[in-house]
Every structure is written in structure tokens, then in C-alpha cells.
Image (spheres, rainbow, N blue to C red):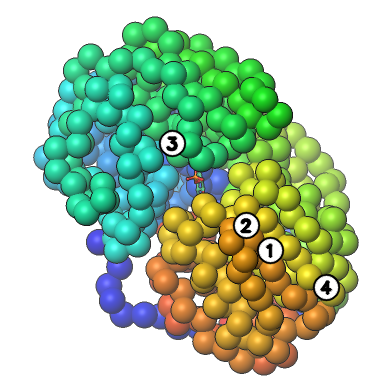
């Protein structure tokens, strides 16, 4: 397990304007995928801008344990020598994914197509999260779980299939992790593996598979859904990947700049894949001054430069079909909603209950302890914005990086300081968060 029990609390207080230009770290989803596809390709892959957070570093270690060569050649620059599709060797030690559901579930998919046994484990948060959602389709493809914790949870041993079967699979929830696990297992199967999703989830796996040379086709399914078909047993070739800045990390300075009076911030190279931009769409509906000043792209992933200025926000209703495009951003959106005038109603948030923590309950608790009126109604979260937040509360982070960062952002504009009990987990996704925010003018002590 990655963390010692010692907690590192921090307090955030009302700050002067946040001003500057920053690039937040590389996108976590793309960083995991670049390492995994680099390991499944033949030859060398060069990755720049990799997120060097604990989650991604655990995926790098797992790729090494499975036989790939993974080396750091400079700041955020990594080289992977792959073993080829289905070429993983049996690891001699358990694969420890720490706090990361993405790393764990995607690697389960990649292992499921290889005739090896691997032990998967993680920290207390990851051990509490559901894995059947991924193990069920992988079992249809021929993989077996030969030992498991209660209810299919970690730690478990996965026995990959010698001759994996291609399947057509309809995901029960909009989840890029389930989709990606099936596609990664499908790489080793003959014929076509198809995933159908009722609501489109982030498509980084599909875009990157194409970039590495796979034959993968996506068509529209229903109103918001997609059908993705991968032709198995391709020869993936090593590729160059430039990882754009993570919009889910950019969300924290972005919301901070909106709520701290006088702020004017530029965030550059932010990934602008339309399946990740729900937060910016919603904040604009709330009245946020967010300007997109430059756009470019790399390997199918668009990027934008965002200029954000402090804004008066108003409550809005966020429709359930927008959830997959901003699933990791509801915590910090709830903070913005608390500073808005009027109620913000966020619908269809059931999936938040199975993230690094139960984020529906944790968001409500974070706001309540700081004097904000909030209600959970079924799968919906309703925040009563009153234009200001009393603050003064101690927030429990529950081993969840995004709770810690959201609460610290809230404290920057609250009437009284906001304290978080533990900042250690911020290192899983945004190791530079505290110094970067301080450089912009945030007062943390
Ligand atoms: C991710 C997918 C999302 C998201 C997670 C990263 C990915 O999870 O919450 O932080 O990289 O595929 P689900 O696919 O389970 O919704």
C-alpha cells in the first residue's frame, strides 16, 4: 500500500486574486493508456508530458512486472519497449495499483488476453471498489478469477485466457474503464470484439489504439450511445504520445479563479476532447467567463487554452446525460454551485458512489460542514447557492484526492478557513497542486 497512516492536514483561507499562466500535469487517463499500449506494442514508444502521479507510476511498475521495459528519460518523458499483443509474462509479485481504479481495471483487461496469472491489489479505497463490472465481461472472453476478496473485490488473482474469445458486450453503465478493459482483452482475441454503450464515455482508448495501428471503428448507437468494433490480433507498433494537460486537474484552478474575486488565469494545453468538457459547458451556463483562446491537437486529442476570470455564478440544472463527460468534476462543480446564487441540481450521479470514495455522500458532507445547504435526492445532488460560503469546517478526505483539492479550493473564497484532514492522496493525480496553487496566490497553511 502506497501510504503511511500519518495524515497531512492543511488549511485554506480567503486569498487575493489568482493570477498567472499554468499548465496542469498530464492527463491521467491518457497517461495510463500510453504506458499500457506502449507495453502491448512491438518496439519503442516515447511519451512526453506523462503524469508522474502515484496512480500512473503504479501502472508503469505493473507494465514492468509484466515484462515491458519502462524508463524515465527526463522530466515527464518516458520510453517503453513493448512485448507485443498477448506477450505479457507472468509477474513474480502482486501488481499493486494503490488508489487507482483506472490502472487496475485497464490492466485486468490487458492481462485477461494473456495465458498468465496475476495478483491484483490496491489500497483500502481500491479494495472497497467493485471489480465484477470488469471481471464479468472478461470471464465471457475466457479469463478466470481464481481467488477473490468478498464480492469480487481486491485482492484477487486473474488467470488470463490462452485463447481469448471475441465478444459483443453492452456495458451496464457508461464506463470507459469497462469499455477499455474489454477492448484491451479483445486485442488478443481473433475476429471482432464489440462494445456497445448507451451513453458515450471518454474515448481515449479508441483514439490511442488507432494511433498505435489497430483497426477500430466507432459508430453512433441510439441518441447518446456508441458501438465500437475492434479487429483483434493487430500488430501494434510503438508510437509517440504527447500527453495534453488533464482537464480534470485543470478543473481545480479553474473553479478557484471563478470564485476568488479579481482572478484572471490562463490554463494552457488543456485536453478538450468533447467527451471530457462537461464541466466547462456547465460553468458557462452558470455565467462563468471562460474563453477558449487557442486550439490544436495531437494524436486525435484536441487541446485548448482557457482564460478564466472571476465571475458571478447562478444555479443551473445539469442533465444526467452530461454525467459521463464530467464524472470526475462534480465535487468541484458543487463548490462552484455553493458560491452561485440559487440552486444547482445535478442529476444522475449514481456512479459517484463507487469512485475513490462515495463522492455523493462526501460532497454533501464537505459542503454541510462548511455551512452550505445541500440535499441528496435519489441519484441527484442539489446545492443551494447563496453567493458565499461560511466555511470554518474540517473536511474528511476519505482517501480521495478530489475531495481534498475541492475543499482547499472552497477555502480560498469562504468567509472562514476550510481545513482538510489529509492532503496525501493529492499525489495520486496532481502532485504539484499545492505549490502550483500557492504560486498563483492561494493561501494554504
Ligand atoms: C476513467 C474513467 C472514469 C473516471 C476515471 C478515469 C478512465 O471512470 O471516473 O477517473 O480513464 O477510463 P469510469 O469509467 O468507471 O466511469
Left or right of residue 194, residue 138 in this image = left
Which sits earlier in the primary sequence, circle 1 or circle 3?
3
Which sits earlier in the primary sequence, circle 3 or circle 4?
3
Q: Is mark 3 within 8 Å of ligand 1?
A: yes
Marks 1 and 3, Cα distance to the nearest angstrom? 25 Å
Which sits earlier in the primary sequence, circle 3 or circle 2?
3
The residue beneath circle 2 is: 329
Give the residue at x 46% y 56%: 355
Marks 3 and 2, Cα distance to the nearest angstrom? 20 Å
Tell me the mark number nearer the camera, choosing from 3 and 4: 4
Instruction: Tell me the SS state at disc 4.
Output: strand
The quadrant of the picture occupied by the N terminus is bottom left
The residue beneath circle 4 is: 342
Give the residue at x 57% y 26%: 207
The residue beneath circle 3 is: 178
Q: Position of residue 162 (x, y in %)?
A: 19, 18
Occupied quadrant, residue 72: top left
Q: Can residue 7 be spotted in the picture?
A: yes
Q: Decide: few, some or many residues near mark 1? Use Cα within 10 Å; few <14, some 14-19, many ≥20.
A: many
Instruction: Tell me the SS state at disc 3.
Output: helix
The residue beneath circle 1 is: 333
The quadrant of the picture occupied by the C terminus is bottom right
Q: Are marks 1 and 2 in contact (CB under 8 Å)?
A: yes
Which sits earlier in the primary sequence, circle 4 or circle 2?
2
Note whether 434 is above or below 300 in the view shown: below
Give the residue at x 38% y 52%: 100
Q: Position of residue 43 (x, y in %)?
A: 36, 19
Amino acid at each position: 500500500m502506497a501510504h503511511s497512516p500519518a495524515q497531512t492536514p492543511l488549511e485554506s483561507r480567503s486569498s487575493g486574486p489568482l493570477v498567472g499562466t499554468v499548465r496542469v500535469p498530464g492527463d491521467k487517463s491518457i497517461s495510463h493508456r500510453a504506458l499500457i499500449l506502449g507495453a502491448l506494442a512491438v518496439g519503442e514508444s516515447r511519451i512526453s508530458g506523462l503524469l508522474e502521479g502515484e496512480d500512473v507510476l503504479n501502472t508503469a511498475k505493473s507494465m514492468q512486472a509484466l515484462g515491458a521495459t519502462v524508463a524515465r528519460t527526463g522530466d515527464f518523458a518516458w520510453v517503453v519497449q513493448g512485448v507485443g499483443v498477448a506477450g505479457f509474462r507472468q509477474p513474480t509479485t502482486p501488481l499493486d495499483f494503490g488508489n487507482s481504479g483506472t490502472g487496475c481495471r485497464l490492466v485486468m483487461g490487458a492481462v485477461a488476453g494473456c495465458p498468465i496469472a496475476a495478483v491484483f491489489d490496491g489500497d483500502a479505497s481500491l479494495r472497497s471498489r467493485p471489480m465484477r463490472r470488469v471481471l464479468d465481461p472478461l470471464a465471457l472472453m475466457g479469463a478466470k478469477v481464481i481467488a477473490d476478496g468478498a464480492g469480487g473485490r481486491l485482492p484477487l488473482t486473474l488467470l488470463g485466457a490462452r485463447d481469448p474469445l471475441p465478444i459483443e458486450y453492452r456495458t451496464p453503465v457508461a464506463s470507459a474503464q469497462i469499455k477499455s478493459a474489454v477492448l484491451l482483452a479483445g486485442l488478443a482475441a481473433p475476429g471482432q470484439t464489440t462494445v456497445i454503450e448507451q451513453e458515450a464515455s471518454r474515448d481515449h482508448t479508441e483514439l490511442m489504439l488507432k494511433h498505435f495501428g489497430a483497426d477500430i471503428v466507432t459508430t453512433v448507437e441510439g441518441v447518446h450511445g456508441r458501438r465500437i468494433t475492434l479487429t483483434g490480433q493487430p500488430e501494434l507498433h510503438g508510437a509517440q504520445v504527447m500527453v495534453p494537460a488533464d482537464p480534470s486537474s485543470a478543473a481545480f484552478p479553474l473553479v478557484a479563479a471563478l470564485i476568488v474575486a479579481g482572478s484572471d488565469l490562463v490554463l494552457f494545453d488543456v485536453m478538450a476532447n468533447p467527451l471530457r468538457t462537461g464541466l466547462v459547458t456547465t460553468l458557462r451556463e452558470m455565467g462563468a467567463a471562460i474563453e477558449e483562446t487557442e486550439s490544436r491537437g495531437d494524436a486525435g486529442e484536441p487541446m485548448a487554452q482557457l482564460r478564466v476570470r472571476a465571475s458571478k455564478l447562478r444555479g443551473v440544472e445539469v442533465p444526467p446525460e452530461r454525467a459521463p463527460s464530467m464524472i470526475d468534476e462534480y465535487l468541484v462543480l458543487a463548490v462552484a454551485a455553493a458560491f452561485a446564487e440559487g440552486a444547482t441540481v445535478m442529476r444522475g450521479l449514481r456512479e459517484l458512489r463507487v469512485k475513490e470514495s462515495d463522492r455523493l455522500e462526501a460532497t454533501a458532507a464537505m459542503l454541510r460542514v462548511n455551512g452550505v445547504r445541500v440535499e441528496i435526492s435519489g441519484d441527484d445532488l442539489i446545492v443551494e447557492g447563496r453567493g458565499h460560503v461560511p466555511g470554518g469546517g474540517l473536511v474528511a478526505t476519505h482517501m480521495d484526492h478530489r475531495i481534498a483539492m475541492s475543499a482547499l479550493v472552497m477555502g480560498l473564497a469562504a468567509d472562514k478557513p476550510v481545513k482538510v484532514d489529509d492532503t496525501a492522496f493529492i499525489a495520486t493525480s496532481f502532485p504539484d497542486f499545492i505549490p502550483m496553487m500557492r504560486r498563483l496566490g492561494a493561501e494554504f497553511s
